[in-house]
Image (cartoon, grey):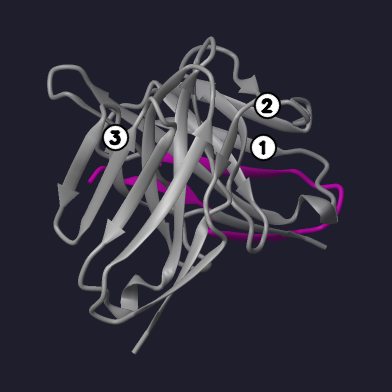
Amino acid sequence: GQNIDQPTEMTATEGAIVQINCTYQTSGFNGLFWYQQHAGEAPTFLSYNVLDGLEEKGRFSSFLSRSKGYSYLLLKELQMKDSASYLCAVRVHTGGFKTIFGAGTRLFVKA
Amino acid sequence: GAVVSQHPSRVICKSGTSVKIECRSLDFQATTMFWYRQFPKQSLMLMATSNEGSKATYEQGVEKDKFLINHASLTLSTLTVTSAHPEDSSFYICSARSWSAGEGTDTQYFGPGTRLTVL
């Protein structure tokens, strides 16, 4: 079956750096997404990794290791507005493409 | 990023009625759209994959006769919840795949979601 694991909650301090990990066991892997979701809103795209390595985009970076089934999202210079849920999602190709989501990590940024 | 719209944003209906939710990709063509539902404090659960011009592919446990999906054009997919019941109350979110081999991009963009409440 398909399985995606990430921590339920994390707390970090404004201005700090936080790393949110995601491990997955899937068949037909075709890429990994990170999304940010504020309560009551739809997810917002943050990053997409299909090859191993680090993708950097401003304060956000995402890393992928396909051999280890592992990814992380790194948030730098944390701001209060970064308090949200961060969803790790894996796209798989099993006859057709589909994207499945982990349960999400709720990040609380404190002053 | 690309824009995906959903309509309506909120709907309240009586039990037994049907509700149609529209999902549109506004500035790109989407051959594939996805429909998710999300319960409070839970993650997104994929309901079905909608491919333009063909039948939708439903996930296990999702009743295709209850959740009718039509992907009539490259920019529009609709989800109709038939004979709605209170347990169908949820946040329904559509997503459209934006893919360009030439640009090397492949991203999935989400609509703002539709909150359905069935009384």
**Picture coordinates of residue A94, whole percent (x, y):** 54, 14
- For label 3, the residue is A49
Q: Name the front one of labels 3 and 2.
A: 3
Q: Earlier in the sequence, mark 1 or mark 2?
A: 2
Asked where in the image residue B81 lies, by quadrant, the reply is top right
Residue shown at the point (26%, 42%) measured from the top left: B2
| Circle 1: element type | strand
The magenta stretch spans residue B22: yes
- For label 2, the residue is B59
| Circle 2: element type | loop
**Residue A33 got which mark?**
none
CB contact under 8 Å: marks 1 and 2: no
- For label 1, the residue is B80
Tag 2, which chain? B
Q: Are there few (<14), some (14-19), or many (20+) residues within 10 Å of tag 1? A: some
Asked where in the image residue A18 lies, by quadrant, the reply is bottom left
| Circle 3: element type | strand
Closest to the observer, B61 or B6: B61
Quote the CA–CA distance across marks 1 and 2: 16 Å
Q: Is residue A98 rendered to the left or right of residue A64?
A: right
Q: Is residue B51 above or below residue A105?
A: above
Tag 3, which chain? A
